[in-house]
Amino acid sequence: MRYEDEGTTTEAGYVVRVPVRWSDMDVFAHINHARMVTLIEEARIPWLFYDERPTAALRHGCVVSDLHVRYREQVRHDEGPIVVTMFVEQLRAVDFTVGYEVRRATDPPGAKPAVTATTQLVAFDVDAQRLRRLTAPEKDYLASFRRDQQANR
C-alpha cells in the first residue's frame, strides 16, 4: 500500500500523515486505543519498509518487543488525518526504539503532541527463529533519525 502522503524527512524526524478511518473511532468519536496503535504502526511503513529504504529487509523480520502510548489530549475521528512524527530514541546491535509524536492535522505548527508513544523493534531472522544484528546500512539510516542528532541534520 502506498500513502497519498508518503512522508517527509524534517529536522524533527520522519513525518507522515495517516488517514483515519470510520472504524478507527470508538463510541465517543475518539480514536480507539487499539486503532491508535495500528495507526502509528501504519506510519512506520513508508519510513522503514519501502523498497528504497536501507531498512526494507526489516519487513521480513521485525518484531515489537515493547510498546508505550501516552494520551495527552483526546484525538477525535473528525480531526484526522493524524500527523505522526517518528524518530529513533535508542539504537543498539539488534534493536531500536522509535519515538512518536501524534498531532491532529488541524493543530497549528509547533503544537504539543496529543499522543506520544514508543515502540522497541527487534530485528529477527524468521527462518532461524532468532534475533539478528542490524546491518551497517540499517544502523546508519536509523542513526540519521536519532533525536539527539536532529540538530545536525
Image: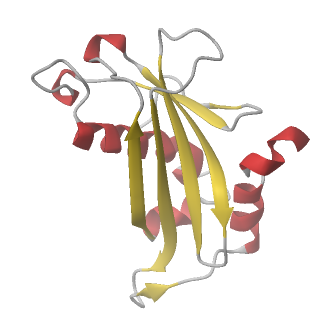
Q: Is residue 109 left or right of residue 30?
A: right
> Where does residue 139 sit, x and y in percent of width and height?
72, 66
Q: Quadrant of the C terminus?
A: top right
> Where does residue 9 sit, x and y in percent of width and height?
71, 34
Write the residue at 56% across / 53% down.
Answer: 98
| Colour approach in the figure | secondary structure
Q: Quadrant of the N terminus?
A: top left
The answer to which image quadrant residue 13 occupies is top right
Write the residue at 41% across / 64% down.
Answer: 66
Write the residue at 31% across / 23% down.
Answer: 20
Q: Is residue 134 above or below residue 108?
A: below
> Where does residue 79 sit, x and y in percent of width and height?
36, 12
Question: Does residue 144 appear anywhere in the picture?
Answer: yes
Q: Residue furthest left?
A: 27
Which of the two residues, 117 or 3, is positioned nearer the viewer here? 117
Q: Residue furthest right?
A: 152
> Where does residue 52 sit, x and y in percent of width and height?
65, 50
Q: Is residue 121 above or below residue 135?
A: above
Q: Is residue 105 left or right of residue 56?
A: left
Q: Is residue 40 above or below residue 76?
A: below
Question: Does residue 53 appear anywhere in the picture?
Answer: no
The answer to which image quadrant residue 89 occupies is bottom right
Number of numbered discs on residues: 0
Q: Is residue 94 left or right of residue 141?
A: left
Write the residue at 18% across / 18% down.
Answer: 29
